[in-house]
Amino acid sequence: MVSFNVIACGGGLGGLAAAIGLKRKGHKVTVLEASTALNEVGAGIQMPPNSVKILKEYGIFDRFEKYVTIPKNIILRRYDTGVPLLTTPLDPDMTNAYGNPYLLIHRADYQRLLFEAALEPDIEYKTGCRIQEVDQKTGTVILETGEKYSADLVVGADGIKSRVRDTAVVPEETVHPTPSSNCAFRATVPKAEMLSDPAIAHFMTDVNSNCWIGYRRHVMAYPIRNGEMYNIVMSHPGQASVDKWNEPGNVEEMKNHYKNFDPVVCQLLTHVKTVLKWVLADLPKLPRWVSQSGKVALIGDAAHAMLPYLAQGAAQAIEDGATLAEELEHCVSTDDIPRALQQYQKKRKRRAETIQAGASKNGGVWHLPDGDEQEERDALMKAGDGHNPDQWSDREFQQWLFGWKAFTNTFEFKL
């Protein structure tokens, strides 16, 4: 096994998972993280079967089991009445079909568990490393302090406003994120508070991901931390700062956005004490993910930031790292790295961009105004013939999405 010196720029979910995958193949990995400490804020994230499979392959999934929640269904509901429009079965259906469950977890737990797993095999993790630029010809990362790190391979996992991308991979232009017309509020409510209110207590005991959909707005809500708190994500018209995930929001503004929603949603929001504002943006298709020299590659949001309407952003970053590690295994010397990175790009770019487009499409499907098109959508959702305007429930798309095996770039499922 050939061992390369690899720098991962960015210590978020994608960067940490990639570091674990690369170290597992025998490479020496240094993670350069801009922040001074782990700083994921309070919010939930979904762990679909395609990412659970990778964590199992890495041998670290058992760390997650006591922190995850297993929902029974994803239920899309009409915004004003709460009447179910579509139910996507999750447990045990997903496990039976794809060999792995669909799970819910707190983002901070997700990052911490990956961080702990990364430290055990002696991956070097450096904080306070803000990147100024990357010299793609030499594989050198230059920090804002002037400090330099060189490697055989640089992995850009530094997010939607990636310095690695803009200085080393697509240096001919500044790639600007494409803001959505929406942004989102994020909030959590403790278990005890949820159970104290009979109108909403059932959300903690009948465990589902519930999503109320309406014109330009939706509310996605589910329990996290093994049922210790309730997570609420609320998409609505508006703007927030790109690459800021912890802007304080206004609770009264939040409630006003959803005053015409299902009364149980309005009641739920009376229990929200503080709220964070979150930008919704994606990236245009990039011309490439790999630098001209073949020494720098992008993963995750740096390559394909996507809207959250398929809950696949983190999962795709984790798939990127797994495929990248597999391709490097075919190398016998550093001369082979450029070819391996081109193979990585070939195997990952179209899939990630298709999911990126699917996420955008799902947002359009959910956010229709009341009228003929909305009524047609509702009828198609209820038809149950395997074809569905909601990408989560469209049989063919779901099988390709959740049955994916990033190590072999194939997908499989059981009927």
Image (cartoon, rainbow, N blue to C red):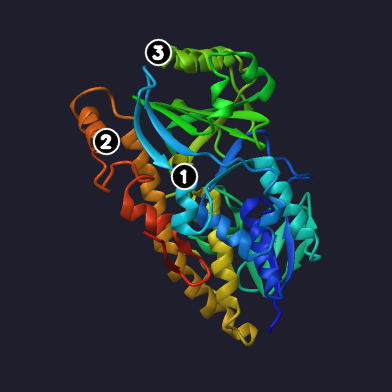
Looking at the image, tell me whether mark 1 or mark 3 is earlier in sequence order: 1
Mark 1 or 3, which is nearer the eye? 1
Q: Residue furthest left?
A: 372
State the image coordinates of residue 360 (x, y, percent, origin top left): 37, 43
Residue 188, relative to residue 316: is it above or below?
above
Label 2 to label 1: alpha-carbon separation: 17 Å
Looking at the image, tell me whether mark 2 or mark 1 is earlier in sequence order: 1
Circle 1 is placed at which residue position? 90
Looking at the image, tell me whether mark 2 or mark 3 is earlier in sequence order: 3
Residue 286 lies in quadrant: bottom left
* Kind of residue indicated by mark 3: Asn
**Mark 1 neighbour density, 10 Å: few (under 14) some (14–19) many (20 or more):** many
Q: Tell me the element at label 3.
A: loop
x 60%, y 85%: residue:
335
* Kind of residue indicated by mark 1: Leu
Circle 2 is placed at which residue position? 382
* Kind of residue indicated by mark 2: Lys
Mark 2 or 3, which is nearer the eye? 2
x 75%, y 44%: residue:
38
Label 1 to label 3: alpha-carbon separation: 29 Å
Circle 3 is placed at which residue position? 260
